[in-house]
């Protein structure tokens, strides 16, 4: 029997029954909210995405979610500093609908990326990371440009490993290092340029959620349909969804596109 949202809610209620947690369920949006009672910091969980993972991986999917939420919020409750931690700062990709300030109403540091995405900045804490806000930046007297420069340098030190799959003569590469920065690798311009130079067709990328980057070498119409389907599936299953749209990489720019079945994509901004 398939797991329903109400059944999942009850299981999460049991997992977060400790007095330090505040939980609530939004039936209309089908989201479950977990907050630390003292700080009111929290995360919202999209239940259909968890159910999709549960259908593939069973209880392990729920256990991993609970571990990620508890470790992240426990770490957020601790005051973090950027002092002497330059090597632990990385850029992260989020959707344009993502919050621009914390629950405590402090401004998060971010820059615009595409019509669908923004770049935020994270302090890596090992098992999780914390998004960098204005007070953290002011404490060490850094400029936003300095933060951006550091994060880009550190990003280039991350290896770009992937699994390759050939479908209908189109090559699909799945970057999945499981380090929290898979989607961030779309910002590695030198790697993208090299990929573009070696591609046989058009380079199309997708960042459906933070733990997946799909890079495709599209040589025929079928390839566009395939990456569109992949992006939708990964977007629905992601813990931190970003966008179900894909991007064409040309002239050193990423251009969001709509992909129409059996047709070459039409630029979204047209």
Image (spheres, rainbow, N blue to C red):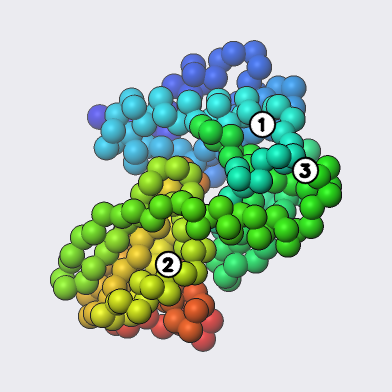
Residue 246 visible? The answer is: no
- What residue is rendered at 52% in x and 63% in y? 187
Compared with residue 36, is residue 219 higher up or lower down, i.e. above or below? below
Q: Quadrant of the N terminus?
A: top left
Residue tagged by mark 3? 136
Instruction: Identify the mark at residue 191; answer none if there is no mark.
Output: 2
- Element type at mark 2: helix
Compared with residue 121, is residue 40 higher up or lower down, i.e. above or below? above
- Element type at mark 1: helix
- What residue is rendered at 26% in x and 80% in y? 200
Comparing labels 3 and 1, the label whose residue is closer to the camera: 3
- What residue is rendered at 64% in x and 13% in y? 19
Q: Are marks 2 and 1 in contact (CB under 8 Å)?
A: no
Q: Position of residue 182 (x, y in %)?
A: 44, 52
**Label 3 vs 1, first from the N-terminus:** 1
Q: Position of residue 263 (x, y in %)?
A: 29, 82
């Amino acid at each position: 029997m398939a797991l329903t949202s109400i059944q999942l809610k009850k299981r999460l209620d049991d997992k977060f029954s400790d007095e330090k947690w505040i939980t609530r369920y939004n039936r209309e949006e089908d989201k479950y909210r977990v907050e630390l009672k003292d700080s009111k910091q929290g995360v919202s969980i999209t239940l259909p995405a968890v159910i999709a993972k549960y259908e593939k991986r069973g209880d392990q999917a729920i256990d991993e979610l609970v571990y990620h939420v508890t470790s992240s919020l426990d770490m957020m409750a601790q005051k973090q500093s950027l002092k002497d931690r330059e090597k632990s700062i990385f850029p992260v990709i989020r959707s344009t609908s993502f919050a621009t300030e914390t629950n405590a109403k402090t401004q998060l540091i971010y820059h615009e990326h595409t019509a669908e995405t923004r770049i935020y900045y994270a302090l890596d804490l090992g098992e999780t990371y914390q998004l960098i806000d204005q007070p953290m930046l002011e404490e060490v007297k850094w400029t936003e440009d300095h933060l951006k420069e550091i994060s880009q340098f550190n990003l280039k030190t991350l290896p770009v490993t992937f699994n390759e799959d050939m479908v209908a003569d189109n090559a699909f590469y799945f970057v999945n290092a499981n380090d929290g920065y898979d989607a961030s690798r779309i910002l590695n311009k030198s790697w993208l340029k090299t990929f573009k130079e070696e591609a046989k067709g058009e380079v199309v990328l997708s960042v459906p959620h933070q733990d997946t980057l799909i890079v495709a070498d599209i040589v025929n119409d079928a390839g566009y349909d395939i990456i569109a389907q992949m992006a939708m599936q990964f977007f629905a299953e992601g813990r931190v969804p970003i966008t179900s749209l894909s991007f064409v990489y040309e002239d050193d720019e990423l251009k969001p596109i709509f992909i129409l079945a059996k047709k070459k994509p039409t630029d979204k901004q047209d």
